[in-house]
Image (cartoon, rainbow, N blue to C red):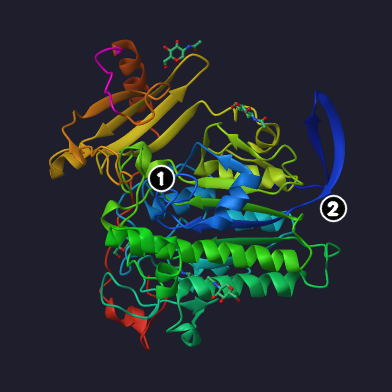
Amino acid sequence: MGYRVISPASLLLTSLVLAHGVTQAMTQKAPNVIMFLVDDMGFNDVSWRDERMHTPNLQRLRDDGVELNQLYMLPKCTASRAAIMTGRYPYKTGLQSNQVFRHCKNNTLPLHLKTLPQYMKDLGYSTHAVGKWHLGFCNLSATPTHRGFDSFYGSYMGSIDNYKLEFTKGEGGYDFHFNEVPHWASKGHYSTDLLTQRTQSILKEELSGGGGEKTSPVFIYLAYTAVHDPIQSPSRYIKHTKCSHIKDPYRRKYCGMVAAVDESVGNITSTINALGLEDEFLLLFASDNGGAWAHGASNWPLRGHKGTVFEGGTRVAAFIHGKKFLPRSPYAYNGLLHGVDIIPTLVGAAGGTVRDDMDGLNAWQQLQQNVSSGRTEIVYNLDTEGEMGAIRHMNATSDFKLVYDKYEKLDGGCAGWQGEPPGAPKRPAIVPCPDYMLFDLSVDPQENDDVSNKFPAVLKQLTDRYSQLKKEEVKKPYYQCMKMSKPHITGGAWTHGWC
Ligand SMILES: *[C@@H]1O[C@H](CO)[C@@H](O)[C@H](O)[C@H]1NC(C)=O
Ligand SMILES: *[C@@H]1O[C@H](CO)[C@@H](O)[C@H](O)[C@H]1NC(C)=O
Ligand SMILES: *[C@@H]1O[C@H](CO)[C@@H](O)[C@H](O)[C@H]1NC(C)=O
Ligand SMILES: *[C@@H]1O[C@H](CO)[C@@H](O)[C@H](O)[C@H]1NC(C)=O
Ligand SMILES: *[C@@H]1O[C@H](CO)[C@@H](O)[C@H](O)[C@H]1NC(C)=O
């Protein structure tokens, strides 16, 4: 399909850094990259927003790095991961559904789509997936080691028990693998600890002794199974951290699970420092979608939750760290970014260019310079069958968002607000809503007021645009729970080769 990455002849690359109005040429080695993707972590679930959360390591990296104030993802796991992995909006690849990939179905990330690790490999990176995949495994060709990763250690599906490492939303079955085979020795250990140790081993194997001379940089995609339900964490995180002060028992337990992720990030950065490589890494941290209220997460003060196209379902806690590569840090970056921008931006950071019909934009230089990303539109999602979608249009004078949501009304209304800090006024969790709503995010980022009556011309402009985008929508393929469902678990573990 003509995908190409233009890579420099060697990994010594020249990047333009605009400092004090002067364009300088600077020679840099391509950064090692770790992308930390947390599952279902809420916008408010970090210590710089809710000080009751125990995330000192994340706070340190964010305080010293570039906070991504407006990074958006899709409302749910599979769609978000598909956007991150392909740089394409899921409505254009048939992956827009809020119904995530099911264990028994023949669903896969379409095999013709080039993936993030494949782009990184073209630039000379070694590539490793650690953690949750959730983009299909019914045939070997769909699994991480056949989709661009040199190695894989983790689970094929979402919602695994964090100690038993078994799937929790169906017939069970062990779901923890090393490359293409089940890894039984991991059973009984806490998933966040396992994923941390694996990441530390990769770093030591690939980079120790190299101290910067090693020619091939490393890309690690670390997708935690935390903090998705089931909410589980070793008791030490709950007892010996600030979490013990949290009264609400759900949030206290959830805080413990977040604290474990924070400790994991701290341990990994310690390993990097011990290797003497603290200046050679870009660390990107983000949640895959908004938090789930039912499990103790909070997206406060944003509206909505995981599974909705409101801000609380899609605007995620995020930062990028790497002082050498982002010389102006620390600062908060307010430019609009979407999960589809991750491929072109990381490829840009590594000195390459994506020549493709991707939806993502390369915002690397804009991030380095703290200027607008150039993004003027976000398609939050567009799911005709699921009856939910939203788009946003931003220019120099206005910033409006159109929300289409018929689906949620089945539950009596659209999502409102929940997860307020102690002492804050309670707000309605469910509110009545029309099919189309218009929000002026420039003055109302919490989506309090539907202004469709006040700005009929904007409403028309955005509904017209929505209808136009609909023409590009690729229908979700027909997936089926395969007849041979049970034998998908062979010897007690999930396997591939049945579609
Ligand atoms: C299944 O994966 C194998 C290994 O990559 C490949 O040879 C085969 O063509 C795939 N089958 C289907 C139906 O995609
Ligand atoms: C972090 O490292 C400490 C000290 O080695 C260890 O006790 C702890 O289990 C590690 N935590 C994680 C999440 O890996
Ligand atoms: C970054 O840009 C924002 C405007 O979006 C500005 O308020 C802020 O001061 C800038 N920070 C730095 C360190 O350049
Ligand atoms: C900015 O966008 C608004 C609403 O989407 C539109 O009405 C207006 O004409 C645009 N302004 C410019 C300068 O393009
Ligand atoms: C899934 O399997 C069903 C039944 O064999 C088939 O009709 C459908 O096309 C398959 N879907 C995909 C995406 O391969």
Secondary structure of the residue carrying numbered label 1: loop
Q: Is residue 258 left or right of residue 65?
A: left
User: Looking at numbered disc 2 in the image, what kind of residue is underneath it?
Assistant: Ser
Q: Magenta stretch?
A: 448-455
Asked whether the viewer can see residue 1, the reply is no
Which of discs 1 and 2 lies nearer the camera? The answer is 1
* 450 part of magenta stretch: yes
Taking the spot 31% from the left edge, 16% from the top edge, the residue there is 460
Which comes before the other along the chain, label 1 or label 2? 2
**Residue 168 location, x and y as percent?**
30, 72
Q: Is residue 245 above or below residue 150?
A: above
**Residue 408 location, x and y as percent?**
20, 41
Secondary structure of the residue carrying numbered label 2: loop
Q: Residues within 10 Å of mark 1 (few under 14, many from 20)?
A: many
Tell me the number on the disc at residue 450: none
Tell me which secondary structure the magenta stretch mostly adopts: loop
For label 1, the residue is 74
For label 2, the residue is 10
User: Looking at numbered disc 1 in the image, what kind of residue is underneath it?
Assistant: Leu
Q: Residues within 10 Å of mark 2 (few under 14, many from 20)?
A: few
